[in-house]
Amino acid sequence: MGPRCGVAHRSEASLLRCEELWRTSSVEAVQFEIATRKSTFRSGSGLPGRVWETGAPAYIPDVGHDVAFRSVDSTGTPGVTRGYCLSDPAGV
């Protein structure tokens, strides 16, 4: 099964902000969406910030046990179980 939810962040000064979020209709992730759209990340902070800092992709097999995935930890979204993050080398 492929991704059921995705987020694109963009950098603004020294922060990453959610630019776009999509999810399949099978994911009940309203709280995750609200928290994600409100969240900002500094370099090294959370999954997006970790990838922004290192430039290396990251994978979290169980987001419920990873403090870097703070938006899910704070919302307890049952439909979101794994996290993947990739960097856009073009910075677009």
Image: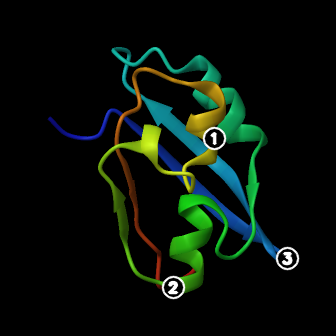
Q: Residue furthest left?
A: 1
Q: Is residue 64 left or right of residue 11?
A: left
Residue 90 vs 34, above or below: the answer is below
Name the residue nearer the viewer: 64 or 53: 64
Element type at mark 2: helix
Residue hosting label 3:
13
Q: Residues within 10 Å of mark 2 (few under 14, many from 20)?
A: few
Q: Residues within 10 Å of mark 3 (few under 14, many from 20)?
A: few
User: Percent from the top left, x then y, of residue 31?
Assistant: 63, 21
Query: Which residue does the image show at 72% across and 70% down from the upper left?
Result: 11
Task: Identify the amino acid type marked 3.
Answer: Ala
Q: Between tags 1 and 3, which lies in front?
A: 1
| Image disc number at residue 54 | 2
Query: Which residue does the image show at 55% across and 24% down from the upper left?
Result: 76
Q: Find the distance from the CA under tag 1 to the CA under tag 2.
A: 20 Å
User: Percent from the top left, x then y, of residue 59?
Assistant: 34, 60
Residue 33 vs 38, above or below: the answer is above
Q: Residues within 10 Å of mark 1 (few under 14, many from 20)?
A: many
Task: Identify the amino acid type marked 1.
Answer: Ser
Is residue 89 something that shows in the picture? yes
Q: Quadrant of the N terminus?
A: top left
| Image disc number at residue 71 | 1
Task: Identify the amino acid type marked 2.
Answer: Thr
Q: Is residue 16 left or right of residue 82?
A: right
